[in-house]
Image (cartoon, grey):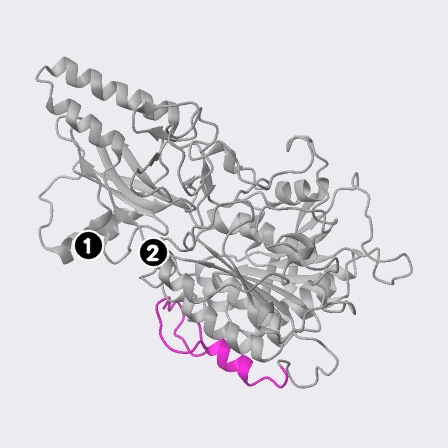
Amino acid sequence: MAPTSATDPTDPTDPTDPTDPADPTDSTDLFGPTGLPDLTGLDATPRPVTGPRVARLARQLQSVRDAAARDALTEAFWAEAARSGTPLVEELDDAPGHRAVTFLWRGHRATRRVLLLARGVTDRDRLADSLLHHLPGTDIWYLGHRLRADHRGSYRMVADISAGAVPVDPALLQRRLLALRAHAGADPLNRDRVPARWRDAEDSVFALPAAPPQPWTGSPHADGPGSGAPSAGVLSAEGPSSDGPGSGAPSLDVPPSGSPPSGGRRSGVPLDVIPGGTVERHTLAAGVLGAERDVWVYLPPDAVPYRPTRGPGDRDGHRLPLLVLCDGDMWFGRLGLRDTVDALIADGVLPPLAVLAPDAVGIATRRLELGGRESYVSFLADEVVPWASARWPLTGRPERTVVAGQGLGGMTALYAGLTRPERFGAVVAQSPSLWWRPGLEPGTVAPDAVGTPWLATLAAGLRDGLPSGRDGVRGAVVHFDVGLHEGALAEHTEALRAVLRARGHRVTRTVHNGGHDYACWRGLLVDALVRLVGTGAGASSGPGAGAGIGTGTALDVAAAGSQGGSGPARGSAG
């Protein structure tokens, strides 16, 4: 998706912007970064499969009668898995755009069943389908899925060693497995991890060869499922190989594992020695919320001089662009966003910018405050931003102020951009909880709700896309990130996007092959920031990065539904 103009179409105030904000070609679906194979025409629905390596081992075990030989084969298999990392990722001769992904668990005599909880793969309403199979006569438990080669996701596993009979009734088994979920943890053979939300634990992460790279997240794509394992978690049908997949090149030119797709860090400065910004945690008296709230504040490193993107005579030229981000406790307290932003600034991909990220406090408070609630948006717009602007040189320009969030936080970001465009001129809504509407009982979660989203109805009622009294203010630029495996979300975002376009908003959407998942959001947030406030220095961690966003050819939105995105949600809803 090459740029068609040297101007910055992410700046709605640019007088040379060639794009009509109401032009349908400005509502672009971005399915994958340039330089990666186009897999969007292939089915992304997870399908059960027995991977070549497990199938071969099963045949070998059937051919031996000696227990010692059986044990030797089993030990060799586990040694191979430990070297490569898990899950096992293998090519499929009959499906070059897909991979066989095999999740493994090493059990013992007391192991009765093993449950896989994989975002974007496990159907929460059919947990029995995610029980691993036992390879008879061994301690090997396995479950294979055929996944499209651009899939990324996090997962947990748990073994049931409880006594008693296994429930035969499907409803009883489902309840038993639901209770088992609380005890799930990371895959011990996978060193690539992401912190879990609301739990003092980690989830494991895997990314297939054509998944968009994440060079700034601290979990580069090149490390693969094993995060540094020699063969990046890939086994050929004939066994392990340090050269990635087998010798047969796939016809769709999917890059071999261990070879990052186009897009990577521009500087050679190691991540651990780049200049570091500061993160401080301040407590504010949030009057509109009637309580104190902690706010995480990131300021760029002094060692990196600020280079204004505007001329020296511009009154805002030396003020920092601003990101207002929901769930600061997760992004700074657990995900290490500071290191990511430091790297982006050091590489010249982002200008020095500030981040204000309120703490979510806890599950109950988050569900009570986030969503389309005026009180929380007022807290952000009228309390947090003015408080910070009185202390640090922050931009006052809405087009340089981004509000972002995930799930209910994404809903909050959308509501803020629609109702306060004079403050927030750009929105990043990642997997927004568009099922939310006023009047829901506290704690209600309804990710598969049908019908027109409440926010679309609200947006349709705004005059010229703006609240009353906002004459002269341009509507916010809106970017959606949507996973193919998030139930009705693709349909909901399309309904809202159509309304926003009709009201003059510039809208883009990235459709990724994953679920409701920080493993995906952490890279996609970077991509969105680069598009909205980047330096235009050519970052390519995602599609349309830099100055070219919004000028490419619009893709067919209907393709998303044909890729497996219309099924049940396979992950969290908030």
* Between 393 and 74, the one nearer to me in the picture: 74
The residue lying at 22 percent from left, 21 percent from top is 74
Q: Is residue 64 magenta?
A: no
Tell me, yes or no, if residue 434 can be seen here: no
Magenta stretch in the rendered image: 436-464
Q: Secondary structure at mark 1?
A: helix
Residue occupying the point 42% across, 62% down: 559
Percent across and percent down for residue 561 are 38, 64
What is the x, y in percent for residue 84?
Answer: 38, 26
Q: Quadrant of the C terminus?
A: bottom left
Q: Earlier in the sequence, mark 1 or mark 2?
A: 1
- Viewed as shown, does residue 91 lie left or right of 478? left
Q: For the N terminus, which image quadrant? A: bottom right
The residue wearing badge 1 is 174
Q: Residue furthest front?
A: 251
Density class for disc 1 (Cα within 10 Å; few <14, some 14-19, many ≥20) is some
Placement of 159 over or under 229, stated as above or below: below
- Residue type, mark 1 in image: Gln
Mark 2 falls on what kind of element? loop
With respect to residue 351, does 475 lie above or below? below
Q: In the rendered structure, are the residues bearing label 1 and label 2 in contact, judged by CB atoms less than 8 Å apart?
A: no
Residue 461 part of the magenta-drawn span: yes
| Principal secondary structure, stretch drawn in magenta | loop
At label 2, the amino acid type is: Arg
Residue at which label 2 appears: 570
Tell me which residue sits at (60%, 55%) in the image. Answer: 528
Category of crowding for the residue at label 2, using alpha-carbon neighbours closer than 10 angstroms: few (below 14), some (14–19), many (at least 20): many
